[in-house]
Image: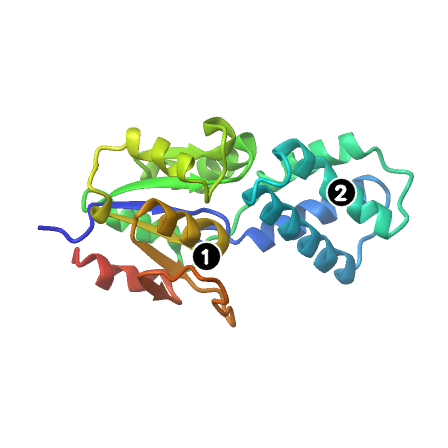
Amino acid sequence: MKKFTTILWDVDGTLLDFLYSQKYAITKCFRTAGRDITEEQIKRYSQINDDYWRRLELGEITKDQLLMGRFATLFEEYKIKDIDLAVFAKEYQEALGSVFSFIDDSLTICKALQEKVRQYVITNGVTATQMNKLKLSGLAEAMDGIFISEQIGTPKPAKEFFDYCLKHIEEKDKSKLLIVGDSLSSDIKGGVLSGIPTCWYRPEGAINDTPYHPDYEISDLHMLYDILEVF
């Protein structure tokens, strides 16, 4: 009997390098607006964006408030007043979904796991952006299904998100599922709250200062082979 039959994959920061796409998108949009952007501003935007996503996970703001608010905060801090916020936000989402970079050769890993375990995407990203990246990268073809919070109506780590996923996948035994993700506040917390085993793809230098502890920790996606015991 297999220890795990199903993987629930996070996307950004786990399968795909989100920082790569983020830097490309924010730089492209600033240049389209006739402005340069510094490394300091890119880093600051990343911090602001992370904060908005954390607030969304906690239920403090809505997705619409996130999509516009992060840029409003950035523009206010740097006193940028001549860029149309709505146009910028729309162009950013399009640019974000137009490029990708694999983490640990993730596509090869997902393809190797096909027919050995079922694989699903679980993501809090914007539907159009995530679907475009997943299709362009080829990851969509390796998956048995894709679950996006925008379509479900509630984000990770909410139990309702994972309840929805459980209703729409073949495996009903939670102990046979494995959530793999880099976010302690989203993936690992969500798994703990829902009673689903978790594997933390630990970003370099990251420290777990939360009360939520994963069942496994890995620093390279290839390490999943040993956990899954499929080869």
Q: Is residue 5 left or right of residue 162?
A: left
The amino acid beneath tag 1 is Asp
Nearest the eye: 178 or 143:
178
Locate residue 160: give its quadrant. top left
In the image, residue 86 sits, relative to residue 41, either above or below, namely above
The residue that mark 2 highlights is 71
How far apart marks 2 and 1 lie (CA) works out to 24 Å
User: Depth check: 18 or 194 in front?
Assistant: 194
Q: Which mark is residue 182?
A: 1
Residue drawn at point x = 87 percent, y = 52 percent: 78
In the picture, the quarter occupied by the C terminus is: bottom left
Residue sitting at x 72%, y 53%? 45
Number of callouts: 2
Q: Quadrant of residue 128?
A: top right
- Indicate which disc residue 196 carries: none
Q: Is residue 30 visible?
A: yes
Residue 38, compared with residue 24, is above or below; it is below
User: In the depicted view, which residue is nearer to us: 86 or 188?
Assistant: 188
The residue sitting at 30% across, 42% down in the picture is 119
Camera-nearest residue between 140 and 211: 211
Q: Is 126 placed left or right of 111 in the picture?
A: right
Q: Position of residue 210 (x, y in %)?
A: 48, 62
Which residue type does callout 2 highlight?
Answer: Phe
